[in-house]
Amino acid sequence: MGVYQKKKDYYIDYYANGRRVREKIGPSKVLAENVLRKRQVQVAENKHLDVRKEQKIRFEDFANEYFELHCKPNHRSLKKADGVNLKTLKAFFFGKYLYEIDPMLIEKFKTERIKKVAPATVNRSLTCLKSMFNRAIDWGKFNGTNPVKKIKFLKEDNKRLRYLEKEEIAKLLQNCSGNLKPIVILALNTGMRLGEILSLKWPIIDIKNNTIHLLYTKNGQKREVPINEQVKTALIRTRKHPESPYVFCKADGSHYGHVRKSFFTALKKSGIVNFRFHDLRHTFASHLVMSGIDLNTVRELMGHRSLEMTLRYSHLSPDHKKRAVDILSKRMDTIWTPEPKIEKEAQSLVAVTH
């Protein structure tokens, strides 16, 4: 900060309300020094020209406004995710004006948050904060550049792709009771997310055409989910509530908020460790790939917008790789058969080596 020269002109550099300001003054160094002193006094007295009345908005107040005007109307999953992120952000930035939140303060938030949660969770909060400031700028609530633009997001570890083998699937289903069993069957055979399954209503299920019409998905797009015989049987056997449209619901007709306790119990009885409900979706995709289904078809079934997300499922188990090259070997046998002379020489070589 201070006065500096660039070519023939002098500039002043100072901070006002948490933001760095640079002003071009002219060829006079003395004038630049005088203007800098004046600006420093204005900042100290809260009279700087950048401080406007409409900018004096508390973070928590704007967070509530952002939630009501942006999150709620746009999408249910956005409402749920940003509701959690906003609670975390409000706890850290409580009492601050929007113009007081600068990159340094955000870096402090990032540093404190990473001590408690995974990098991906921190990044979701930063994404929410970035969206907040974009809306604040669009709505005329904030002057200046979005401070989150200068923040480097944390590197995420997306290598965790836990999925169940066939034997584990059988054990899990044996230990699922009540409505948990059809819920797990749907997850394993459709790749639907837990929230999508728990919010299922009978009118969007077309048993005749073997299709579930999802109107609300994570990425905001409608999706048609094909159902196989296992899913169809599970749905037919699920008892309908006389007064509720939900497929899976409580005695009062309201749908389940989660199945955490019953799912954990089923995992424990099955001896399955290090596994989450969302990993059933990984299981669905992994077994499709291991069955030879092309990645683009898997992408469509998963409801991914881009193939990049689906590429993480392109891994194959060692046994499947072995089966793959064995199949290739059989195919090659039909294309190329060794000549008798070459084959005889190969057998002689094997005899010598033994």
Image: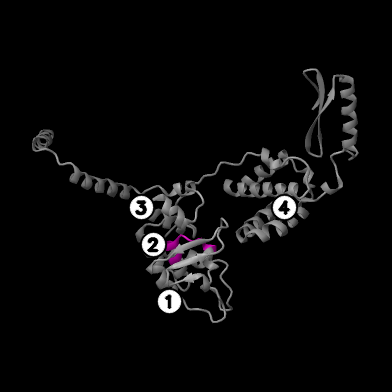
Alpha carbon separation for disc pair 4 and 2: 41 Å
The magenta stretch spans residue 328: no
Kindly report the distance in space between the C-alpha atoms of the residues bearing marks 1 and 4: 46 Å
Q: Residue, x 37% and y 53% (percent of image)?
A: 293
Secondary structure found at label 2: helix
Q: Secondary structure at mark 1?
A: helix
Q: Could you tell which of marks 3 and 1 lies nearer the N-terminus? A: 1
Q: Amino acid at mark 4?
A: Ala
Which residue appears at 40% of the width and 47% of the height? 315
Q: Residue lying furthest front in this view?
A: 209
Q: Is residue 283 above or below residue 345?
A: below
Q: Is residue 309 above or below residue 107?
A: below
Q: Which residue is mark 3?
A: 290
The extreme bottom residue here reads 242
What main secondary structure does the magenta stretch of the protein show?
helix
Q: Nearer the viewer, mark 3 or mark 2?
A: 3
**Circle 2 is placed at which residue position?**
169
Closest to the camera, between mark 4 and mark 3, is 3
Q: Amino acid at mark 1?
A: Arg
Tag 4 and tag 3, C-beta contact below 8 Å: no
**Of label 4 and label 3, which has the lower sequence position?**
4
**Tag 2: amino acid:** Ile
Residue, disc 1: 237
Range covered by the magenta-colored residues = 185-195
> Circle 2: is it few (<14), some (14-19), or many (20+) Cα within 10 Å?
some
Q: Is residue 194 in the magenta section?
A: yes
Q: Is residue 274 visible?
A: no
